[in-house]
Image (spheres, rainbow, N blue to C red):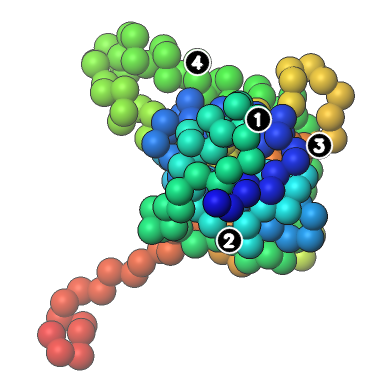
Amino acid sequence: MSSHGLTGVPDAGAFLARLTRLDPGAPVRLRASGGRTALWAHLPWDVLVTREVAGRGPDDATVSAAELLAVLAEGGDRLPSLRDAQWRWPLPPPASETVETVSAAELTRLAAAAAGTLREVSTGGLAGRAVGQRAVRDALLDHVALVVTPAGGGPVEVSQRLVQAVSRMGFLGPRGAEVPDTRVRVAGRWVGLSAPYGVAWLQAVSKLTVMPIGGHPKG
């Protein structure tokens, strides 16, 4: 029987508890490096989240988040059954660049404003017309919450998907606490928010060019 190897149980438990509230059936991927282990998960709105905890776990293994949380709650050290086939998402490159910093208070404000808009539109509709909650939610998640322009580079768009991820996973820390600013990071086509208690990553969607069929060489 393999051991999960995690010694930072409170940190791992906090990550897994938030994750399973958002997605009870979520898998979690464990990747060890040195004496620490990165926990990776995919949120229902297509954002990857990760948190490093103390303890050398498996080199690379995917298990049920709910099952691992149950083991930790019992004080056990068993690694749940492997579910490697359930992990279907690429990870961002390991090297990244910080292009801006944002305060936890500002990110909390942006997350709360979006949640308030969702409640208002879901209750009262839009311009007097009823609108499906899912349609409103998707539109809000796709909204660009922040645009930062690093020196010598083009603008970097920070989606509301990332803001909601760091907020709902508790990565910003307790409300009103003195914590370091969150870093906006770029790694290839990925944009991330590196908050005090975890990181959220979103891969930019490629913009496809549609050509008229008559212009195709075999048209």
Quarter-wise, where is residue 119 in the image?
Answer: top left
Whichever of callouts 4 and 1 sits on the residue coming sooner in the sequence is: 1
Residue 145 visible in the picture? no
Residue 75 is labelled as: 1
Q: Secondary structure at mark 3?
A: loop
Instruction: Calculate the distance from the C-alpha at mark 2 to the C-alpha at mark 4.
Output: 39 Å
Say which of 48 and 35 sits in front: 35
Going from N to C along the chain, the mark reached first, 2 or 4, is 2
**Which is more foreground, mark 2 or mark 3?**
2
Query: Where residue 16 sits: x, y (%)?
Result: 57, 34
Real-space Cα distance between discs 3 and 1? 33 Å
- What is the C-alpha distance between the residues marked 3 and 4? 24 Å
Q: For the residues labelled 2 and 4, say whether their Cβ atoms are less than 8 Å apart.
A: no
Q: Residue at x 48, y 25 (%)?
A: 21
Q: Amino acid at mark 1?
A: Gly
Q: Nearer the viewer, residue 49 or 34?
A: 34
- The kind of residue tagged 4 is Gly
